[in-house]
Amino acid sequence: MDSKIFKTLEYQKILNKLSHYAQTAAGQQTALRLQPSDDLEHIKKMLKGTDEAYAADRLKGVPSFNGVVDITPAVKRARIGGTLNPQELLGIRTTVQAARRIQVYVASLHEENPVETLLFWSEQLSEQRSLENSIKGCIDENAEVLDSASTELSQIRRELRSGEVRIREKLDSMIRSSTVSKMLQDQLITIRGDRFVIPVKAEYRSYFGGIVHDQSGSGATLFIEPESIVAMNNKLRETRLREEREIEVILQKLTALVAEQADMLLYDVDILGNLDFIFAKARLAREMKATLPLMNDRGYLKLKKGRHPLIPLEQVVPIDVELGNSYTSIIVTGPNTGGKTVTLKTIGLLSLMAMSGLFVPVEDESQLCVFDAIYADIGDEQSIEQNLSTFSSHMTNIISILKNMTPKSLVLLDEVGAGTDPAEGSALAVSILEHMHAMGCRMVATTHYSELKAYAYERKGIINASMEFDVATLSPTYRLLVGVPGRSNAFAIAERLGLPSRILDYARGEVTEEDQRVEHMIASLEQNRLTAEQEREKAEQLRREMEALRSRHQTELDKLESQRDRMLEKAEDEARVLVDKARSEAEKIISDLRKLAQEEGASVKEHKLIAARKELDEAEPKQRKKNTVKRAATRTRSIMAGDEVTVHSLNKKGHVVELSGSKEAVVQLGIMKMKVSLDDLELLQPAQTPAPRVQKPVTGVKRTRDDNVRNELDLRGANVEEALIEVDRFMDEAFLANLGQVHIIHGKGTGVLRTGIQEYLRKHKHVKSYRIGNYNEGGTGVTVAELE
């Protein structure tokens, strides 16, 4: 596709916005190089990836690509034998770590919601755990070579530290001497050129001997390495040279490991960049409030509330466009600054975005087409250098379009035929449009010529459209009206601005009768359109209200059915328990009868049979009484504290402890107390005396201090889910052990574990308060909780 169209439709601005959402250098480069495709299946695959990333962003958020760096130059240098520095090796390690983290994220996402495209790319990332561990064992997070990188390096650094200590001790004893201290500018030890020196006043230079390594700007202070420590500094220098050689050996070994995996590492960088690019498309879609378009290759385009993506959301006016079904060309008329050019750019730019695998700012179920090319002649491209007028410039572009267009192309023409004599320009415009329409391409053109309105009206497959204009406010509304040609509105505007009526009447007389009929016809069409649109909006409002009402009724019905199912399930469970209990008791009674028969020699006494029968009858389950059925009160007096009563809903006997208001009483049922409605109680035996009744002891749990329970919990290294299970168990033990304060160690890290634990503590019923640990308690790596 001609790159000129990208500039005309401002496609590169979309790519720049897209690149800002990429987190890696490779992802940004992929975004900036994005090109539209004319392969429908390839476009669908790209859109599928964007859709999966969009869903992932909505459910779990975009994964972090933190740690991924551009390791391509370092890996290529390692492959040709160069030695990598610690910073480059650290970058390779963090990139490998990030690749594994992204792979785990996509696998976890796929388990919850299939994401085949993302999984396809993530599974191609190589496993580089061995290389990662090798670098991690030698290079720390600050890109410094660790002492443990080799036995030799560890020994050398011990010698270095020991040598530095001896030199400092020697110099410390020197500068503390009363004789020497007066010769020093400051009583301190400093370093010049990796050698330890002291600041000596210039006049005492000869006293120390040794080597002068530097002097102050004024020359009053000399930084001297005393003669007594020259040999010690020399030995320290030799040790440092040994350290550098050993570090070089370590770096060469690590570089060799990188070189062995060079091809896989470079491929991983490309894969990570592509995954980052896919998630960048999802973030751009969210920012633009864009949706997934339906794609086809049959030349059909339907935009529902399409918005220009570069115009702010609060300013843009959506358009509805359909092209390629009943008609393949649209002729748009209307006033200047009415939005005709924006309409052309919106159609073209959204088509380019969809063909690039991007979501587009339209409503759901919008359709876009795969074109083999998009051509546009938009704006005034007059060139002084080429000595081309506006008309010549437009003609040059149109001639180029006519040479290259095909029936599968989209052509956008702005002010076709403008810039020359109106009569010739309109005739030329009709001829150009007729040729393009006969070619079978999809075309949208704007014009001021009234002759093109009649041409579009008479020609099959071409439809008029206009940009709406509010005569009352003398301003455009920027709404595209398909099927209605635009009116000039010149007389209405002039009249509103105060042009004398006699001048207007004369002007109207100059307009031909045919032109007046056309204007009246357009006005009538516009009025009918407004009426139809109002009716449609009313019908749409009624439809939405009916849908909401139906949805609400369906929700209530589902709720009632759910409640019914729960009640039936509960009743069945209760009945099952009762039946099991009765069956168990019946089995026991039968067993006892058999035992009696054996003891009595197969002859059971009558009174024993009667007793057994009674016991069997009592084992029969009684149907539970419903709480909603109120029994008639048969009381001789009101229930008082101390009365023995029956609770009908539970079929249990108990004693009234106290009255709770005028409608409830607190009843003691065995070891359990509960509030019961007075209507659910039946008086059995009044209290004998008004003396206060001794309350029966209630079983309780006494909390005592358990010396075996620790007051701290170490969760470092655990994920949030594992940690919360341990915290829940720990808090219960601490509460039962009567601990007043506990420490939860979660480490500093990224803060995710600390946030999860503190959110859990905030909701825990036994936690009175919590805080970050003090400096001597571990700081932000510890949370201290106070228990009730």
Image: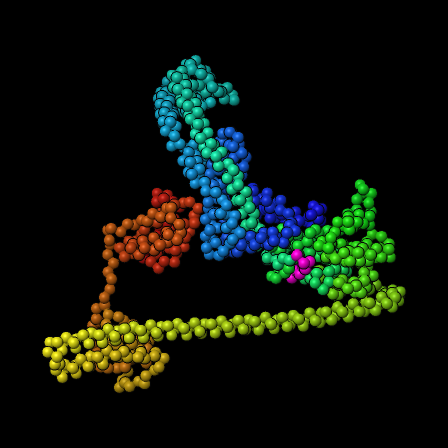
In percent of width and height, residue 182 lies at: 40, 20
**Left or right relative to 61: residue 767:** left
**Left or right relative to 749: residue 282:** right
Residue at 62% across, 51% down: 356
Residue at 44% across, 74% down: 560
Residue 81 position (above or below residue 477): above
Can you see residue 652? yes
Residue at 71% across, 57% down: 343
In percent of width and height, residue 522 lies at: 78, 67
In percent of width and height, residue 188 lies at: 41, 25
**Left or right relative to 267: residue 673:** left
Give the camera-side residue of 267 and 673.
267
Give the camera-side residue of 89 and 308.
89
Q: Quadrant of the C terminus?
A: bottom left
Residue span colored magenta: 297-307
Residue at 60% across, 48% down: 18
Can you see residue 397? no
In percent of width and height, residue 523 lies at: 78, 68
Residue 123 position (above or below residue 297): above
